[in-house]
Image (tube, helix red, strand yellow):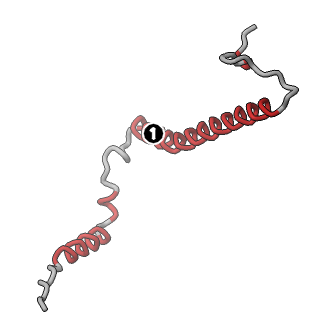
């Protein structure tokens, strides 16, 4: 039976020390960003505006997707009803009565 060589533990210790050092750093180091907390109102307003934009965009995209899927489902339902209801006149091929401009 062969013995495996022991794995070095220094990478684990290095990661542990880095995590400990990051946790013990004073909070002042975290507030050292010169552009985020600058006194210029224009810079601060730009950060607030882009933050708001990044919050709103995913919800707007989701809303557009839901709207598009709902509209597609409604069109499919109308097409299904039209194909099964004999009293509804059928559209000519290549002619969409919803877009008829006359």
- Tell me which residue sits at (62%, 35%) in the image: 68
Is 79 placed left or right of 33 in the picture? Answer: right
- Image vertical order of residue 90 relative to residue 69, above or below: above
Does 102 appear above or below 38? Answer: above
* Camera-nearest residue between 7 and 90: 90
Where is residue 28 drawn, in percent x and y?
32, 61
Left or right of 76 in this view: 65? left
Image coordinates for residue 75, horizontal then vertical, percent: 71, 32
Residue 39 image point, x, y percent: 38, 42
Q: Nearer the viewer, residue 72 or 9?
A: 72
Left or right of residue 10: residue 77: right
For residue 40, which quarter of the picture? top left
In depth, the one of 35 and 51 nearer the eye is 51
The quadrant the C terminus occupies is: top right
Q: Between 29 and 96, which is closer to the camera in this rendering?
A: 96
Q: Residue furthest bottom?
A: 1
Q: Element type at marker 1?
A: helix
Q: Is residue 50 above or below residue 6?
A: above
Counting other residues with Cα less than 10 Å from the Cα at mark 1, is it few (<14), some (14-19), or many (20 or more)? few
Residue at position x 75%, y 35% from top?
80
- Give residue 2's position: percent from left, percent from top: 11, 89
Question: Which quadrant of the figure has residue 41?
Answer: top left
The residue depicted at 31 percent of the width and 66 percent of the height is: 26
* Residue linked to disc 1: 50
Which residue sits furthest top? 102
């Amino acid at each position: 039976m062969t013995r495996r060589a022991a794995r070095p533990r220094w990478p684990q210790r290095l990661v542990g020390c880095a995590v400990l050092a990051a946790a013990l750093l004073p909070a002042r180091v975290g507030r050292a960003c010169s552009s985020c907390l600058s006194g210029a109102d224009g810079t601060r307003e730009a950060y607030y505006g882009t933050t708001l934009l990044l919050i709103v965009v995913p919800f707007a995209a989701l809303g557009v997707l839901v709207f598009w899927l709902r509209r597609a489902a409604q069109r499919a339902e109308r097409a299904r009803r039209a194909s099964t209801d004999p009293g509804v006149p059928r559209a000519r091929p290549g002619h969409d009565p919803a877009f008829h401009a006359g």
